[in-house]
């Protein structure tokens, strides 16, 4: 049930029956889908000698009728229009059309109308409509993610587009797995409810024939939850490899763009961090920073050994061995320099922003500690000149989320101090966050202080002490997964859609977080899957968040929501 | 993984549309008075469809049916054929290697020759293919050059894999050969040495025969060292060849797992380089227009006319 394998299977099937030289044409969304799962060299093996975007393919008028065109697009109206223009004056010998989701009948008719020269050989729906960044983690790269925060009345058509895109993505995941799930959603979130209901309508009514798969003993579960139930995780600074790179530098479709952080030689400006292709990364992506440092040092030592022995070419055998192993050596060299560069950059950033200091307080705000000590710590850090604006904002937000009700006066003091210290701070942002994701709005027990079991657990943990202060925090998702495993998910909090009901525990669970996932949560899921509990979890979201992105969504939503609040 | 085939529905609709279109076009070709009427009917019916290309479908259809691939495709196909040939020869080579390694009564010279010949052939094919491959990177339109580059890369990867495969097979063969030769030879020599000693002790009077025997032994060991040297030379030669090929190819071959192996990166760089190319062309056009040369030429021509006029005037004035 790996997402990456599913996408690869689709692409393989697309290309396998078409012989001869091919050109693959993608749109801006499917290019992400294909790029994370398939490499350029693999395409070349399948005789695909040109890859282009559908927007630029129409600019050239050159006829290349010795090539067969394979289109893989999302079935949007813009893409259909572009295709129609292409079909009217075809450039290639044959046209094979693959769409990543369901086609409407009118779209098929429109295409058929334009195909005067009858160049189209096949029209198929191959449901790879999601970006499979890790085997159990997918994202949809939704452009206007901030819409999930706003109420429906603000911009109904845009919100409908957002929901449609999410429903399409979720449906594609289940079509790829050939499953039809039972759907549950978070009661307190309107948008989660809407998405859950629209997905159920699609799977059980509109396209019930398509989704009518062989039923397994226990149906799989789709759980739709809202980001705002756990605003804590995206705000925290991360210390495990994959999450840390995304938090400090930024990962997009498994690529890291280093150009913004400094000057690098051309081949190191952009690097690939993919667990499928890089075995060192796969072994270390969930390790914490200290361990990574040691492992990279070991890798560098290994590499230096080999490099030294390569310089020591005394005999013919040595020379022969060097020539034999040269490709491996080159690959290793590239890999080592990539990881060394990343870790160096991150160390630099940690040093500049004093993140070890900041993160300690963050973790205490997230996990334990008393209110008085927390207030003092946050005040001190706010007064500290070398802390950056974004870190100050995060600290105040974390404090506010936890101690929202406990001491309003001190909270006000912090707001004022923040506003006076940070020139770029948009006033009211913290209050906006509290309004969206405050203790009254949340379903889950974010701080483990709602029911006795959680309080007891926290106390036990406090007494035992933690291995690593910086990685104490466990995302709320971990508790959600535990309650699914134990079958303890309350119907009151997470109702079913329609009259479905789950007998027993599901074997396969897809959790979709509206508003975005984080790499810390995907790490939680991966570790859970590795622990052989008998249940497979898959995590998906509208985007992959880091603190910068989460704050940007909040700001954007606040900016849009403000005029309407003044009206009200 | 679920898929859904919509080709049937598509074809059905396409045929339906075609049958509606066909009678209209045939009636348009009809002559006579009601041509104008027909034409208006035609245009009104056409407008009910989605706007099609305004091009006359005739000539484009002709250009479409030609569909010959560009010339360089022949080169790339030849290289592909060569690679296939090389693969076949490699399987032959493996068989001959295996045969040569088997213990036999003959001295295996012909096997050696076959191995040498085959190895040379394969190396030769690889070298020729590599040279041909380098020729592929000529100029052309942006898209075409991209396709050519990708074809080059794919063939280069195949060639490199083949050369490495050949190297590996050679080295395993040589290793096993050395093991074999050393084994019996070591024992042989030892036995002969001890035999020699005993003979020395026994046959002190048979100097001639001993010398003869020793000479033969020496000759044989010389022969063996000579053969060993030749083999080493062969290894050195093939290592050099293959190293050269690999060095040349490594520029073309994509390193797997790096950013260059990403499809989205390649699309970006195409877009960037096409844009860059366009900008360069535009800049060149502009400089050419503004160009000093044109200016100079026009200035000179004007000056020439001016001088001519002066000359004529001078003639008029001074001749009057």
Image: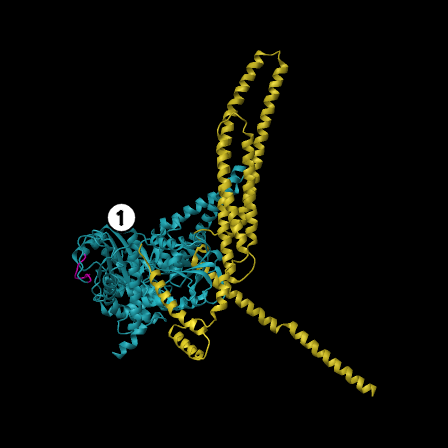
The chain identifier of the residue carrying mark 1 reads A
What is the x, y in percent for residue A95? Answer: 42, 61
Asked whether residue B120 is drawn in magenta, I would say no
Task: Give the quadrant of residue A198.
Answer: bottom left
Asked whether residue A493 is drawn in magenta, I would say yes
Figure chain in cyan: A
At horizontal 54% and vertical 42% (from top left) the residue drawn is B122
What is the x, y in percent for residue B62? Answer: 50, 65
Task: Give the quadrant of residue B280.
Answer: bottom right
Q: Is residue A427 visible?
A: no
- Is B148 situated left or right of A221 in this image? right
**Magenta span of residues:** A489-497
Is B2 in front, or is B235? B2
**On the image, numbered disc 1 is attached to which residue?**
A531
Figure chain in yellow: B
Give the position of the C terminus of chain A as an image quadrant: bottom left
Q: How is the image coloured?
A: by chain
Graded by Cα atoms within 10 Å as few (under 14), some (14 to 19) or many (20 or more), the crowding at tag 1 reads: few
- Is B254 situated left or right of A426 in this image? right
- Is A332 situated left or right of A184 in this image? right
Task: Give the quadrant of residue A368.
Answer: bottom left
What is the x, y in percent for residue A347? Answer: 40, 56
Is B186 in front, or is B11? B11
Residue at disc 1, secondary structure: loop
Q: Is residue A271 visible?
A: yes
Is A181 in front, or is A211? A211
């Amino acid at each position: 049930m790996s997402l990456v394998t599913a996408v690869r299977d689709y692409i393989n099937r697309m290309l396998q029956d078409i012989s001869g030289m091919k050109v693959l044409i993608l749109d801006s969304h499917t290019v992400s889908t294909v790029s994370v799962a398939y490499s350029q060299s693999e395409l070349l093996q399948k005789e695909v000698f040109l890859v282009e975007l559908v927007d630029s393919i129409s600019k050239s008028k050159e006829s290349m009728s010795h090539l067969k065109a394979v289109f893989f697009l999302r079935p949007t109206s813009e893409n259909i229009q572009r295709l129609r223009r292409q079909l009217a004056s075809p450039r290639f010998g044959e046209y094979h059309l693959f769409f990543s989701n369901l086609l409407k009948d009118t779209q098929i008719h429109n295409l058929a109308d334009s195909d005067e020269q009858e160049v189209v050989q096949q029209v198929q729906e191959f449901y790879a409509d999601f970006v499979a960044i890790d085997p159990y983690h997918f994202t949809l790269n939704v452009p206007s993610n901030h819409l999930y925060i706003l109420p429906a009345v603000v911009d109904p058509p845009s919100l409908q587009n957002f929901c449609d895109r999410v429903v399409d993505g979720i449906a594609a995941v289940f079509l790829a797995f050939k499953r039809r799930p039972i759907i549950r959603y978070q009661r307190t979130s309107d948008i989660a409810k809407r998405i859950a209901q629209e997905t159920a309508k699609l799977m059980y009514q509109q396209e019930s024939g398509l989704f009518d798969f062989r039923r397994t003993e226990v149906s799989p579960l789709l759980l739709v939850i809202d980001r705002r139930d756990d605003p804590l995780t995206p705000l925290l600074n991360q210390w495990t490899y994959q999450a840390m790179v995304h938090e400090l530098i930024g990962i997009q479709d498994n690529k890291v763009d280093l150009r913004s952080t400094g000057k690098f030689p051309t081949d190191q400006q952009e690097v690939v961090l993919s667990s499928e292709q890089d075995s060192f990364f796969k072994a270390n992506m969930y390790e914490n920073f200290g361990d990574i440092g040691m492992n990279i040092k070991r890798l560098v030592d290994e590499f230096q050994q080999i490099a030294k022995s390569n310089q020591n070419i005394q005999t013919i055998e040595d020379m022969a061995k060097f020539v034999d192993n040269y490709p491996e050596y080159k690959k290793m060299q590239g890999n080592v320099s990539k990881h060394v560069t990343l870790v160096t950059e991150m160390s630099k950033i940690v040093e500049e922003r004093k993140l070890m200091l900041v993160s300690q307080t963050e973790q205490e705000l997230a996990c334990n500690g008393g209110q008085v000590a927390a207030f003092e710590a946050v005040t001190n850090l706010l007064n500290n000149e070398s802390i950056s604006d974004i870190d100050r904002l995060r600290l105040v937000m974390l404090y506010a989320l936890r101690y929202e009700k406990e001491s309003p006066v001190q909270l006000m003091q912090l707001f004022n101090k923040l506003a006076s210290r940070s020139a770029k701070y948009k006033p009211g942002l913290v209050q906006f966050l509290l309004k969206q994701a405050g203790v009254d709005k949340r379903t889950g027990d974010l701080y483990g202080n709602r029911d006795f079991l959680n309080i007891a657990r926290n106390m036990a943990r406090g007494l035992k002490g933690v291995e690593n202060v910086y990685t104490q925090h466990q995302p709320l998702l971990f508790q959600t997964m535990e309650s699914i495993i134990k079958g303890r998910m309350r119907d009151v909090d997470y109702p079913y859609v329609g009259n479905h009901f789950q007998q027993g525990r599901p074997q396969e669970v897809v959790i979709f977080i509206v508003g975005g996932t984080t790499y810390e949560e995907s790490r939680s899921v991966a570790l859970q899957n590795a622990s052989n509990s008998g249940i497979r979890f898959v995590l998906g979201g509208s985007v992959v968040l880091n603190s910068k992105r989460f704050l940007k969504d909040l700001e954007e939503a606040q900016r849009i929501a403000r005029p309407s609040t003044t009206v009200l | 993984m679920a898929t859904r085939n919509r080709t049937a529905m598509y074809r059905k609709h396409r045929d339906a549309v075609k049958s509606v279109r066909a009678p209209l076009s045939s009636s348009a070709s009809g002559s006579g008075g009601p041509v104008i009427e027909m034409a208006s009917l035609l245009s009104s019916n056409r407008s009910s469809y989605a706007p099609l290309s305004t091009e006359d479908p005739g000539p484009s259809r002709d250009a479409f049916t030609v569909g010959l691939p560009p010339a360089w495709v022949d080169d790339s196909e030849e290289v592909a054929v060569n690679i296939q040939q090389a693969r076949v020869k490699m399987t032959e080579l493996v068989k001959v290697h295996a045969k040569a390694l088997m213990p036999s009564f003959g001295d295996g010279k012909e096997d050696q020759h076959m191995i040498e010949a085959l190895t040379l052939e394969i190396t030769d094919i690889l070298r020729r293919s590599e040279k041909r491959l380098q020729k592929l990177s000529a100029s052309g339109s942006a898209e075409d050059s991209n396709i050519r580059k990708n074809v080059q890369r794919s063939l280069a990867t195949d060639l490199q894999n083949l050369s490495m495969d050949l190297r590996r097979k050679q080295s395993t063969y040589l290793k096993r050969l050395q093991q074999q030769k050393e084994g019996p030879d070591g024992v042989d020599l030892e036995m002969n040495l001890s035999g020699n000693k005993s003979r020395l002790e026994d046959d002190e009077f048979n100097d001639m025969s001993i010398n003869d025997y020793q000479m033969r032994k020496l000759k044989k060991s010389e022969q063996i060292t000579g053969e060993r040297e030749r083999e080493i030379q062969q290894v050195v030669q093939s290592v050099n060849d293959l190293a050269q090929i690999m060095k040349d190819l490594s520029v073309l071959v994509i390193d797997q797992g790096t950013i260059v192996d990403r499809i989205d990166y390649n699309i970006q760089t195409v877009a960037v380089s096409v844009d860059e190319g366009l900008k360069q062309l535009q800049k060149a056009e502009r400089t050419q227009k503004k160009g000093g040369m044109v200016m100079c030429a026009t200035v000179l021509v004007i000056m020439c006319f001016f001088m001519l006029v002066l000359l004529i005037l001078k003639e008029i004035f001074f001749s009057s």
